[in-house]
Image (tube, rainbow, N blue to C red):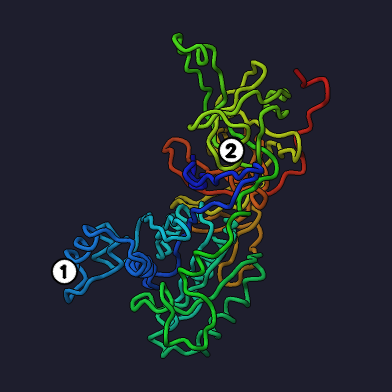
Amino acid sequence: MSVLTSPSPATVPSVHAAGAPLPVDILRFNTCGSVDDGKSTLIGRLLYDSKSLMEDQLEALERSADLTGGGAINLANLTDGLRAEREQGITIDVAYRYFATPRRKFIIADTPGHVQYTRNMVTGASNANVSIILVDARLGVIEQSRRHTAIAALLRIPHLVVAVNKMDLVGWSEARFNEIREQFEAFLPRLDIKDVKFIPISALNGDNVVTPSVHTPWYPGPTLLGHLEGVHIGSDWNLNGFRLPVQWVNRPNNPTDAQLHDFRGCSGQIAGGIVRAGQKVLVLPTGIVTTVKEIWTYDGRVPEAFCPQSVTLVLADDIDAGRGSMIVGLDNPAGTGTDLHAKVCWMHSRPLERGKKYFLKHTTSTVQAVVTELVHRLNIETLDPEPAPAALTMNDLGEIRLRVSQPLYYDGYAVNRLTGSFILIEQGTNATVAAGMLLPSHEVVKPESGDFMI
């Protein structure tokens, strides 16, 4: 639905005998950093050294060597698929790659480093469990390093890895590594990032990427792949407070199948919490409380389901619930309101100004919105807010207030990345102009007993 959409059902964890979800075995991560920090080379090295390449991929890599100069194989070509990317030596579009080890499966998003394509970085990072910030050991922390770290914090990516690359070009200096670490630690507390790992690497030569390096006896930690295999992500999903944005009403209406003849279910992807057959739920915006009669998945009927599974709920009562509706649990109520407070990353060349009207797409609902206030813009150099800016320009991070034409039902983005995210769409052109993260609402849905019950 947006740049902040949820993962596919393939990421669904299994359920053990007690019925509780096990940690997911698929980890999504993105690489980011400035131009020529080695993001694409790092991913190529991961794939190459972990023996995750097919023979035809290796052959294509060898055939593309003439584009790199000198006839040498360029590992970056595994992800830089556009000819313009290979000729310029930069990443422009987001490239996705998949590989697996005996311990875990991985989905990689190789995102651009150039400031012009920061919006593409937001797209690739929006679903990540881990964000890898690459830093050139020669240059240290620069503006794009701060910008991408701030975006990772804004997107509430749970785990951050600072990969100090090109350590071979600074003589594998422990002092230089510690200096860069101190530069990051000076501003990381202001971004509220809890889990940060620093790893010295050489993506070009493979040091500390898949195998430990003999050049860093002073570094006692894991390799990059070892860290990615071991990082705990089972608790990253929000399993408190059931949320199901309804995508469509499932009516097979098969006259030859008695089970499907009168079947009517609400289909969508669970955005939070756990739902069980027999559970009381609240259907919004009607405000009616009903009971979950059955839960269906691709594999058939199940007694319970949880985020981020795709399901069809059969309700005990016939209720007007279509696309844009949301089914929620009675515990941990959702926030609601027409006056919204949000943080945004502006993605368009035309600036965001107070009074502008847009379409706002949130989960499966689209409403009209008007920007009522520009609260502040984030200064990337100092990480201080600049209050009441005249506008937000492309790649700016800021905080705004909006008013929407219909109430939204949502959680704060810090609580639920799926129900707390939205995009702004320019009216007339349908261009996606901003990715937004909602701040918590002071008003919550409170069904009144009797009035809303069936």
Judged left or right of residue 257, residue 324 is: right
Q: Is residue 276 left or right of residue 152?
A: right
**Which amino acid does the dot numbered 1 rest on?**
Asp
Q: Residue at x 45, y 68 (%)?
A: 225
Residue 249, can we see it?
yes
The answer to whether residue 408 is above or below residue 157 is above
Q: CA distance from mark 2 to mark 1?
A: 48 Å
Q: Secondary structure at mark 1?
A: helix
Tag 2: amino acid: Ile
Q: Nearer the viewer, residue 347 or 240?
A: 240
Q: Quadrant of residue 54?
A: bottom left
Who is closer to the viewer here, 157 or 382?
157
| Front residue (pair 172, 393) | 172
Disc marking residue 41: none
Q: Quarter-wise, where is residue 332 in the image?
A: top right
Residue 255 at x, y percent in the picture: 46, 9
List x then y, in percent, for residue 65: 19, 68
Residue position marked by numbered label 2 in the rendering: 270
Picture coordinates of residue 291, whole percent (x, y): 70, 24
In which quadrant of the rendered image does the C terminus lie? top right
77 w.r.t. 24: above or below: below
What residue does disc 1 label?
66
Q: Nearer the viewer, mark 2 or mark 1?
A: 2
Residue under the image location 64 percent in, 58 percent down: 376
- Tell whether 164 sits left or right of 340: left
Image height of 342 relative to 160, above or below:
above
Label 2: element kind = loop
Question: Could you say which quadrant of the image residue 115 lies in?
Answer: bottom left
Residue that lies at the very extreme toward the right in this rendered image: 449
Residue 175 coordinates in the image, percent (x, y): 52, 90
Does residue 94 appear in the picture of this structure? no
